[in-house]
Image (cartoon, rainbow, N blue to C red):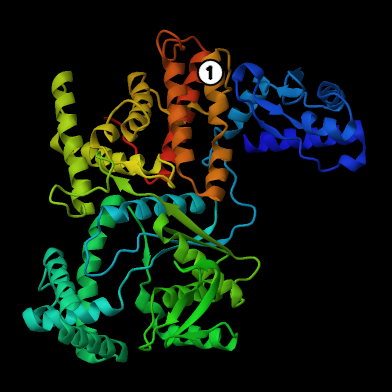
Amino acid sequence: MNATQEKLKLQLEQAIVAAFGADFAGLDPILVPASNPKFGDYQANVALSLSKKKGLQPRAIAAAIVDKLDVSEICEAPEIAGPGFINLKLKTAYLEAQLNAIQADSRLGVPAAKTPKREIVDFSSPNIAKEMHVGHLRSTIIGDSIARILEFQGHDVLRLNHVGDWGTQFGMLIAYLREVYPDALTTANALDIGDLVSFYRKAKLRFDTDAVFQETARQEVVRLQAGAEDTLHAWKLLCEQSRREFQIIYELLDIKLTERGESFYNSLLSGVVEDLEKSGLLVENQGAKCVFLEGFTNREGEPLPLIVQKSDGGYNYATTDLASLRYRIQQDQAKRIIYVTDAGQGNHFAQFFQVARKAGWIPDDVELVHVPFGLVLGEDGKKLKTRSGDTVRLRDLLDEAVSRAHADLKTRLQEEERQETEEFINEVARVVGISAVKYADLSQNRTSNYIFSYDKMLDFKGNTAPYMLYAYARIQGISRKGDINFKELGNNAILLEHETELALAKYLLQLDEIISSVGQDLLPNRLCEYLYELSKKFNQFYDRNQGVQVLEAEEPQRTSRLILCDLTARTLKLGLSLLGIQVLERM
């Protein structure tokens, strides 16, 4: 009810001016949703702050405002409570009219952005020659959800996968493979991803302990940067091998990305250093070219530098990130650039953002946002690991979720003595398993760590994907049981009589403000909380003992309640789709 709140805010602002004069034009009426439904739907708290300026009691201030306030089309007569709170209760007729208006709207009353922007969401970002692991889960899922929400709002979103596909690790890996498995550098698919990862680990161990091998690896990096044909060919094969494995994960998670790895910006790195030099920001320190930062110090309390060119002439992550930032502003014309990475990289982003601002590369109309997230923990409260202490492969984690969902479904079918095809069982297990992992992650405040638990995320009770999917499927069950085609209900009038109908209606009309807030604050858990509360409101509405009859009701209540069911299902489907979650017609 974002539009409703805006209308009420405008009316309150006008009433304040009418009561106390033009000097108070534009004063915030401090209008917020009521904390307790018994006080109404909205509460204006401006009287308390205004009383100090006017030297009057807050209740007298509130009374003066209410005397000039005309909200009769939207609300019941305003009431003053406590020390001067102005309580506003929406009229039933107004709620009915709002619901009737969104029936035929595919966007369910959520407006598109008035001024769409070019936005970049940088997320996932695995490294070549390494398998995606649990550490990539949050970036991939959170980034996708943010991109979906911004796209739904009408923004022009570029989803970028900043893959680690360049640098010293390639010289190290290619040098090692030349010795132990040269076919991998000339023949496509000579290795699977597991073998490639194993070779990478061995190459890293050798690099850390063998000075001669270190030099050989560095020479391979030089050859790669110089475009040596055999080294470049080997690099392309290794990238393609990893890319295919990444794509399996992305298809399983229904993730769409445009890959633009570190190598894409390689030719732009020298220009970054040259421009920083021209701007007078570069300082040579122990042979390296650096920019000293404000607000960052080392252990000795000395200013901390951001190195943009190493003493050996090489570049690092910061140089690449600066080059990519400039490209995204100048070439991609982005107005907001969103980086979805773990909270541990917070300092890195603050540092290179500062350098870019000092260099004058960030126009006033461009916003840079680091979206940090916490760790995925095991049930022991420590970083999630396998029993052997290794990082959990993302593919294994997802497969296990689907496997458990499959076993749970088979058990339920036996208990209910239901017969379903293997195709149905496999599809439901896939959707429930993947959705459970996604929702468990997105329902947490992303800034916090969370404990990964298959049992909790697959539970049909509580704030979980199965609970949400069941609420949607339950509504489709009403349709099947009553042989109702929701699309054929037309634009029949909605009538709100029972308290559970009113509670559900008010919640349905909050979708626009929830999506608006998530698009701004980039906290998908707020959408999860909304969908969970909506599901609970629907279950209370449909509850046989405390709710209302639907299929058994007389007309016009029957059709009205069926429309409420349909609006709930459509809202759940839309909301879940913005989280990257597919619904099920039957479970």
- Residue 206 seen anywhere in this rendered image of the structure: yes
Q: Position of residue 50 (x, y in %)?
A: 82, 33
Q: Nearer the viewer, residue 344 or 155?
A: 344
Question: In the visual, does 368 lie left or right of 236?
Answer: right
Residue sitting farthest toward the right? 21
Q: Which residue is drawn at 25% across and 92% down?
A: 228
Picture quadrant where residue 550 is located: top left
Q: Which of 9 and 297 is in front in this view?
A: 297
| Amino acid at circle 1 | Glu
Residue sitting farthest toward the front? 300
Q: Which residue is drawn at 26% across and 51% down?
A: 252
Picture quadrant where residue 364 is located: bottom right
Q: Where is residue 366 in the image (x, y as percent from the top left)?
A: 60, 65
Question: In the visual, does 381 lie left or right of 337?
Answer: left
Q: Which residue is drawn at 57% across and 31% down?
A: 509
Q: Is mark 1 on a helix, strand or loop?
A: helix
Q: Position of residue 18 (x, y in %)?
A: 90, 33
Q: Which residue is drawn at 64% across and 53% down?
A: 114
**Quadrant where the N terminus is found in the figure:** top right
**Quadrant where the C terminus is found in the figure:** top left
Q: Which of 214 and 457 is in front in this view?
A: 214
Picture quadrant where residue 344 is located: bottom left
Question: In the visual, does 115 lie left or right of 476?
Answer: right
Q: Position of residue 431 (x, y in %)?
A: 27, 40
- Residue 105 seen anywhere in this rendered image of the structure: no
> Is residue 223 placed above or below 133 in the rendered structure?
below
Question: Disc 1 designates what residue?
Answer: 501
| CA neighbours of label 1 inside 10 A, class few (<14), some (14 to 19), many (20+) | many
> Is residue 459 placed above or below 549 in the rendered structure?
below
How many marks on residues? Answer: 1
